Image (cartoon, rainbow, N blue to C red):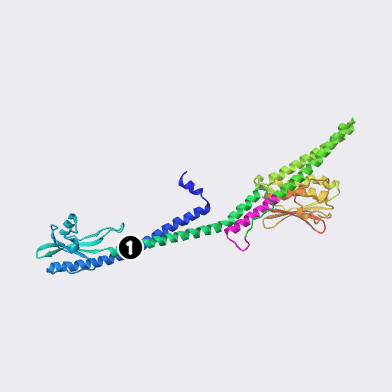
Amino acid sequence: MNPRDRLRRLPVVTRLVLAVAVTMSLVLTGAAGLVYWRVETALDQQLDDDLTTYRRSLDQAVHAGRPLPPGPSGSLQQVLDPHGRVLRSSDALRHAPLLTATELDAVAHGATVRRDVGSLLPITSDTLRLQAKRVAVGGQARIVVAAVRRGHRDEALRELLAQLAIASALTLIAASYVGYRTARAALRPVEQYRSGAATLAEGAQHTRLDVPADRHDEITRLGHTLNHMLDRLDAAAERERRFVADASHELRTPLTLLRAELDVALHRPRSADELTGTLRSVDTEVQRLIDLSNALLDLEELGSSRHLIRTRVLLADLVEAAVTPHLRTAERAGRALTLDVPDTAIDGDARWLQPAIGNLLDNALRHGHGTVRLTATVDESRLRLSVTDEGPGFPPKFLPRAFDRFARAEASRTSEGSGLGLAFVHAVAVAHGGTARAENTGHGSAVILDLPARLDLPA
C-alpha cells in the first residue's frame, strides 16, 4: 500500500491535524531560518568590522616598523614572510602558522584571505575568524594575519538555535492541539448525524437529526438538508405503504368477485343463458383488472419525464380527440358538453395529454351534473385548461387528497371507478412541468391544469 492510500485510510481528524502540523512545521522552519539568518548576518558583520579594523592597524604598524598594537579581547596576530616563516606572533600561537600553504601563496600574490577556524556545531575550542593580507616593508613583502575569537558569536547563535527550537516545538504542539480540538468540534455534528443515520438504518421510524437552531453554517445546512431528505423518505414510505394497501384492496375486490362467480357456476349445472351471464360478469371484472393494471403502469411510466416526447400539437385537435369518445355518454345522460379552445399550438406529448383530458371529462360526466364545460386559455406562454360541471362539488375533506392514488369522494370502495383518474391527471401535469388542482366553484366542481407551453399561431 503506497503512502497516499495509507493516508486516505486515516480518520479525517488525524488527517487535518497532520496537515496543520506539516504546514506549521514549514512556516516555523521558514520563520526560524529567517530570524537565524538575520541575527547571524548582524553578528558576522560586527565581527568582520572589528577584524578589518584590527588588521588595518596591524598593517600600519608593520609598514611603519612599529610594535604590533594590542587588539580586541582574545585577538591574535601573526606576521610571516612570503615563505611562511613566522616573524612575529602572539604568545598563544607559539609560532604555529595560521595559514596553509595554499592560503600563503594566495596572499603572497596579493589576495586577501578570510577564513573561519573551528565550527559552530559541534562545539570546539579556539574558534577563530582570521584575515590575511600582504604588506610592503622597505621593498620586502610581509604577510599580516589578524584573528579574533568567535566564542561569543557562536555562543549567541547556539543559544538562538536552542530558543528557536523550543519556541517552534511549543508553537507546533499548541497549533496541533488547537487544530485537533477545532477539527473535533467541527466534526462532532457530523458524527451525531452519522449516529442518527445508523439509528435509522437499524429500523427506527420518524427519527430526525438534532440540528442547532442558532447556527447557519455548512454543517447545520447539511443537517437541515438531511432532515428534509428524511421527511421526503418518510412521506415516500408512507405513500408506498398506502399504495400497497390500496392496490391490494382494489385487486382483491374483482378477484373475489371472479372467484365467487366461478364457484357459483361450478356448484351446479347451469343453463346456457346462465353461463353466458356468468362469463359476461367475469369479463367485466377481468376488464376492470386490466384497466387497473394499465393505469398503474401508466402512473409508473409517468414518474420519469424521460418518457415524454414533446411535439408541436394543435390544441383544438388534441381536445377534439379527447372529447369524441365521451360525446355518446353525454348524449345518453342528456347532458351538454361545451368547448372553448383557442386556435393555438402547444409543445406537449399528445399520448399523455389526450387521456388526461379524457379522464377529466369522464370524472365530470360520472360524478357531476348539468353541463360540462372545457375551457382553455393562454396567458404568458402558459396553458390553463379547466373542466367544470354543475354538480354538488367535491366534499371539503376530499379536496386535499383529490389527486392521491385510489382516492374516492365516496366512502365505499365498491363504487364505480378505481380512484386513479385524477392521480393520472396530476402525474401528466407534473411530468410536463405544470400543476393540477381541484376546487369547488359554488356552482359545481372544477379541475384545472396549469401547464407551461410554447404557444404559436398556426401556420
Among the 4 quarters of the image, the one containing residue 123: bottom left
**Residue 130 appearing in the image:** yes
- Residue depicted at 41% across the width and 62% down the height: 167
Q: Compared to 349, does 279 lie above or below?
A: above
Q: Which residues are magenta?
A: 212-236
Q: Nearer the viewer, residue 421 or 459?
A: 421
Q: Is residue 384 left or right of residue 389?
A: left
Q: Position of residue 178 (x, y in %)?
A: 50, 60
Q: Does the stretch in magenta take in 122?
A: no
Among the 4 quarters of the image, the one containing residue 188: bottom right
Q: Position of residue 164 (x, y in %)?
A: 38, 62
Q: Is residue 23 left or right of residue 353?
A: left
Magenta residues: mostly which secondary structure?
A: helix
Q: Does the stretch in magenta take in 224?
A: yes
Tag 1: Cα neighbours inside 10 Å, few (<14), some, or many (≥20)?
Answer: some
Q: Nearer the viewer, residue 272 or 43?
A: 43
Task: Provide the secondary structure element on which disc 1 rests.
Answer: helix
Q: Position of residue 109 (x, y in %)?
A: 15, 58
**Residue 351 appearing in the image:** no
